[in-house]
């Protein structure tokens, strides 16, 4: 009785935009989502042709997109075009003080200047022992 009266009162107060669903034990309100622009965007790209780098270059120049690149399709079609595309990407990334690295055989990641790709340090080669037994 009291619950039904309360439910009717709440429904009459709320606007049609904010939907109210009243159950036996809880009240669920629809959350309002605000259109917020992200500070960093992580975006996948696929290189099918050399021309596909235009979108990637634009994203790099914008300065807030981390690009994950699938290079397998272009690698299968034309390795020389892939090399040309990667050279162009490297030059643009260097000019924008970003970073680029490969992981696996078919993936690259390109970052803007505020992010760097972690690389595992390789151990320096062990010094070769000097052979004192050499005869002059």
Image: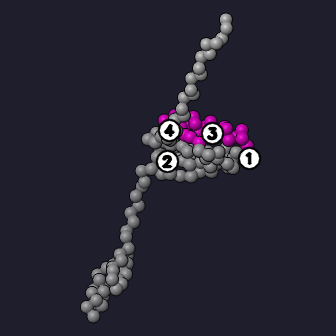
For the residues marked 4 and 2, what is the alpha-carbon distance in whole angstroms? 11 Å
Which image quarter holds the C terminus?
top right
Q: Earlier in the sequence, mark 2 or mark 1?
A: 2
Disc marking residue 77: 1
Q: Secondary structure at mark 4?
A: loop
Q: Is residue 80 in view?
A: yes
Tell me the residue that label 4 is attached to. 98
For the residues marked 2 and 1, what is the alpha-carbon distance in whole angstroms? 27 Å
Badge 4: residue crowd in 10 Å (few <14, some 14–19, many ≥20): many
Tell me the residue that label 2 is attached to. 65
Tell me the residue that label 3 is attached to. 86
Q: Residue at x 67, y 8 (%)?
A: 135
Which residue range is magenta in the image?
78-102
Horizontal side, residue 28 vs residue 71: left or right: left
Q: Earlier in the sequence, mark 3 or mark 1?
A: 1
Q: Residue at x 59, y 42 (%)?
A: 102
Task: Please tell me whether residue 100 belongs to the stretch shown in magenta.
Answer: yes
For the residues marked 3 and 1, what is the alpha-carbon distance in whole angstroms? 15 Å
Horizontal side, residue 24 vs residue 110: left or right: left
How far across and down, in percent of the image, does residue 46 sit? 63, 51
């Amino acid at each position: 009785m009291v619950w039904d009266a309360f439910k009717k009162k709440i429904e009459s107060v709320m606007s049609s935009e904010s939907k109210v669903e009243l159950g036996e034990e809880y009240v669920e309100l629809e959350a309002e989502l605000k259109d917020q622009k992200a500070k960093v965007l992580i975006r996948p790209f696929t290189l099918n042709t050399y021309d596909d780098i235009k979108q990637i270059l634009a994203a790099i120049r914008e300065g807030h997109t981390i690009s994950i690149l699938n290079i397998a399709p272009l690698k299968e079609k034309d390795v020389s075009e892939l090399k040309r595309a990667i050279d162009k990407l490297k030059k643009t990334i260097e000019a924008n003080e970003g970073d680029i690295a490969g992981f696996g055989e078919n993936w690259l990641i390109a970052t803007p200047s505020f992010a760097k790709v972690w690389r595992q340090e390789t151990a320096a080669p062990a010094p070769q022992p000097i052979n004192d037994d050499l005869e002059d």
